[in-house]
Image: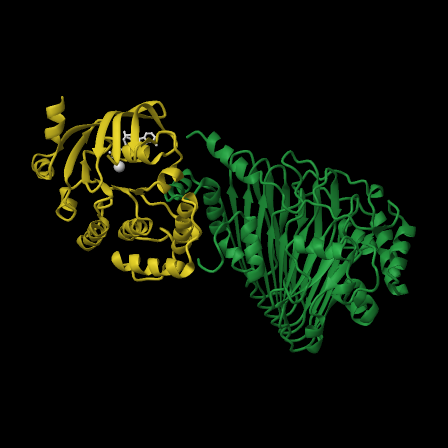
Chain colours: A green, B yellow
Amino acid sequence: MDTAPQNNIINEVTNKEYEYGFVTDIETDFVPKGLNEDIVRLISRKKEEPEWLLDFRLKAFRHWLTLKQPNWGHLHLPQIDYQDIIYYAAPKKRSEKQSLDEVDPELLATFDKLGISLDEQKRLSGVAVDAVMDSTSVKTTFQDTLSKHGIIFMSFSEAVKNHPDLVRKHLGTVVPYTDNFFAALNSAVFSDGSFCYIPKGVRCPLELSTYFRINAANTGQFERTLIVAEEGAYVSYMEGCTAPQRDENQLHAAIVEIIAETDAEVKYSTVQNWYPGDKNGKGGVYNLVTKRGLCRGDRSKISWTQVETGSAITWKYPGCILKGDHSVGEFYSVAVTNNYQEADTGTKMIHLGKNTRSTIISKGISSGHSQNSYRGLVRVAPNAINARNYSQCDSLLLGDQCGAHTWPYVQCGNESSILEHEATTSKISEDQLFYCQQRGIPTEKAIGLIVNGYAKDVLNKLPMEFAVEAQKLLSITLEGSVG
Amino acid sequence: MLLNIKNLHVSIGGKEILKGLNLGVNEGEIHAIMGPNGTGKSTLAAAITGREGYEITEGEIWYKGKNIVGMSPDDRANEGIFLSFQYPVEIPGVSIQNFMRTAINAKREYNGQAPIPTVDFLKMMKEKQAMVEITEKLQNRFVNVGFSGGEKKKNEIFQMAMLEPSLAILDETDSGLDIDALRIVANGVNHLHRPDNAFVVITHYQRLLDYIVPDFVHVMYDGRIVKSGGKNLALELEEKGYEWIKESNL
Ligand SMILES: Nc1ncnc2c1ncn2[C@@H]1O[C@H](COP(=O)(O)OP(=O)(O)O)[C@@H](O)[C@H]1O
Ligand SMILES: [Mg+2]
């Protein structure tokens, strides 16, 4: 049957305007454009950092100079001009932020508009937020509640000042600056991000969340997040992000490091909604991110859930190093691409300990002229006896101009481990669409419904508050209470 | 007249399937359409419900005083046309509850009404489930996924009960049903039958018509209605077989 009408419908659905494309007019403190040792020193000085941290940055920078931008992804990532980027931009502060009254009202309004209220009274209870605009943290809510439990949740910069030993102990232990080109870049120039520490035996009573916003033009965002869960601790952490609509591309190269000690559990959820570029592929964020968790202790567990809908180019592989015996790694991903977006995303599960288990569920949804790739590595070390991995990689195609690709890499170093891999590729069928329409559901809602159903296994893993946003992003109309 | 089809010609991929079909249905009536396989019964249902790919080359479909040719399938549905599918479609990951709520709210939006309050919706689900004797929890079951043939058909009747259409077309809803399921399906229809709505029941067997008593029976052959009559026509057809129709038409 003729697919043209269906393609038209899909075009309409996928050409929706980006809702978060506005720019906040706020006084911003920039460093000069370009990158060299002086810039690295300047960033460090602006942040009033200790000598060891400047040292770390400089080592990373010098290493970065020896590296080349990687080009193995199934992506059209152009050679970026790293001298044409501003590496530090911060909203000018009136004073040290602490109380809400002291935060610039323009900033509060910005986050309100994004649906992230920083007013604790107005927040849904149960979620503490660290709001980061460009290179600095604007406000962290509920710090009092958290500190009662001994939990540290603050911007990375504050953590460097207030808890230097903790930061120094863990920084770069999961993602060393030598890891890859973008990790080295981030380690040299990282600006702000969140630091989170859950002491031994504590179950964090709130969902912790960081909201990243790029605002300034020609500016890269290089945030760095470090989460440490001590023995028996538990935390659920969420990350959200948006950026203004601009014609030029913007670089985002972040690092997230997670450490889970014995019996600790960390759930990390992301709804990535950076500006994807316009429908002709102009502009958009280059999202080049290194995220990794280390299950250091026995029976520890790290779980990544991501809903990737934004960015012109996405290059990220949140992974787990399963070092402790019986440790567990999970990766649940929905990646949606449309127009000219390109995503090359997946995970790395490195089994080192005995009886370690990992689960990978990846759902790619492509439409328009986009390219959507799953790339995943499962490696089982010789000593990791009785390791288990289950991988399921599904691709859903909307229309016939987009591409879906799956690159699973498997390296198994012993005989006692069992690795399973399943993959499917499907299209939304005309039968399904008509069935919905015959029940009165208009086409675009029907597509949303079907896509939501397709991604259900992953969306179910998101914390409530995020699930709602994610469902909306997948153009879903149902209210959360039923269904 | 609720539905008035005049001289309908329908082609699929350039091949003419319906070749000048006429059918009039008033409110309050039940019509049965019978006929051999491949004669165009499902094509008729698809044309009335506006399925893409079914090209109307000639003729008109009047429904509630409007010629609906060219109207989108969802608008037709929201105007009260319902089709119980011969082959209900699976939608993985979408619960029946979510599906029904989305459908009901789409209709309400179409009519300029606010979404249905959750309490009312849940009450309605319970009521209609009881009517078609579905006992399990539908918030956990995905649309038609892993359903037996009988369950799928019961689910169609359940959806019909939820959406309360003005014109319901049942396309071989009885095929492959055991006697219990057949009774449940028929009960559902009889329960919903009112003076202001109508049913078009497409069936292969006269058996269903023992439970759903039609006002009119039409026999289709080669893209046309070739014979119409009362309930007795179905019995006659059963007795003499479709060969009788074919012969009388050659
Ligand atoms: N999608 C389609 N593409 C091509 N031919 C079709 C399609 N659907 C039905 N037909 C043809 O149209 C004719 C009528 O089919 P149908 O309406 O399903 O008959 P019935 O429901 O009476 O068994 C058959 O010859 C069938 O092969
Ligand atoms: Mg048929």
Q: A168 or A130: nearer the eye? A: A130
**Residue at figure coordinates x 63%, y 64% from the top left:** A123
**Residue at figure coordinates x 60%, y 44% from the top left:** A373
Q: Is residue A77 above or below residue A253?
A: above
- Left or right: residue A226 versus residue B175 is right
Quadrant where the C terminus of chain A sits is bottom left
Could you say which quadrant of the image residue A228 lies in?
bottom right
**Residue A348, horizontal then vertical, whole percent:** 64, 55
**Residue A444, horizontal then vertical, whole percent:** 48, 41
Q: Is residue A101 above or below residue B232?
A: below
Quadrant where the N terminus of chain A sits is top left
Q: Is residue B17 above or below residue B109?
A: above
Q: A31 or A338: nearer the eye? A: A31
**Residue A173, horizontal then vertical, whole percent:** 76, 64
**Residue B165, horizontal then vertical, whole percent:** 30, 45
Ligand 1 picture quarter = top left
- Residue A362 visible from this viewpoint: no
- Left or right: residue A38 versus residue A215 is right
- Residue B94 visible from this viewpoint: yes
Total marks placed: 0
Could you say which quadrant of the image residue A254 lies in?
bottom right
Q: B111 or B81: nearer the eye? A: B111
**Residue at figure coordinates x 83%, y 46% from the top left:** A86
